[in-house]
Image (tube, helix red, strand yellow):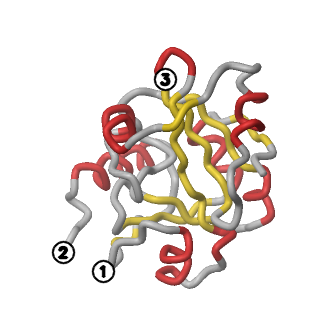
Amino acid sequence: MIDATHPGIARVAALLRTAGHPGVIRVLPDACRTAAEAAAAVGCVVEQIAKSIIFRGPEDRAVLVVTSGGNRVVEQKVVEALGGQPLGKADAAFVRETTGFAIGGVAPIGHLRPPIVFIDQDLRRHDEIWAAAGHPHAVFPLGFDDLVRLTGGTIIMVC
């Protein structure tokens, strides 16, 4: 069983504490690698799940798109937000190397190398959203304004 001492979870928890965020990380008994699994585990609708999608951006920098669990990212919208800069697929090794997290547990904060961050405007529709907390077994609640504040992300339409 995974617990809050896992390095990824501990890193996210420390950042939340430092930022004065009151959300408590919830460690789940089963891994939630999809938005649907996470929504079922926490008892919310899939649109309240803040999915962290990593792309390979300009100069091999990670581009993090935090999107509503019900949305599919249209890559061209992200390219436009990057001012036309190219965008590529990120494999599991790139995700782990740049974020420090495994796919399915990528938190919107606490990346090893600061990414370029875009936030799906559709997440604004919910008072409470849930994001991965550094491991596929861990999530935390937050509001849209907190997500923007914690990540420094730019709000865009992603779908």
Circle 1 is placed at which residue position? Answer: 29
The one nearer the camera, 28 or 58, is 58
Q: Is residue 36 left or right of residue 95?
A: right
The one nearer the camera, 105 or 125, is 105
- For the residue carrying disc 3, how many other residues have a C-alpha within 10 Å: few (<14), some (14-19), or many (20+)? some
The mark found on residue 93 in the picture is none
Give coordinates of residue 115: x percent, y percent: 51, 30
Seen at 56% across and 65% down, the residue is 130
Q: Amino acid at mark 3?
A: Arg
Q: Amino acid at mark 2?
A: Met
How much space separates mark 1 and mark 2, taking CA atoms? 7 Å
For residue 76, what is the image quadrant? top right
Circle 2 is placed at which residue position? Answer: 1
Mark 2 and mark 3 residues within 8 Å of each other at the beta carbon: no
Which numbered disc, 3 or 1, marks the residue closer to the eye? 3
- For the residue carrying disc 2, how many other residues have a C-alpha within 10 Å: few (<14), some (14-19), or many (20+)? few
Give coordinates of residue 12: x percent, y percent: 38, 49
Q: Is residue 37 left or right of residue 1?
A: right
Question: Looking at the figure, which quarter contains the N terminus?
Answer: bottom left
Circle 3 is placed at which residue position? Answer: 61
How much space separates mark 3 and mark 1, taking CA atoms? 33 Å
Which numbered disc, 2 or 3, marks the residue that appears first in the sequence? Answer: 2
Give coordinates of residue 146: x percent, y percent: 63, 50
Which numbered disc, 3 or 1, marks the residue that appears first in the sequence? Answer: 1
- For the residue carrying disc 1, how many other residues have a C-alpha within 10 Å: few (<14), some (14-19), or many (20+)? few
Q: Is residue 87 left or right of residue 20?
A: right
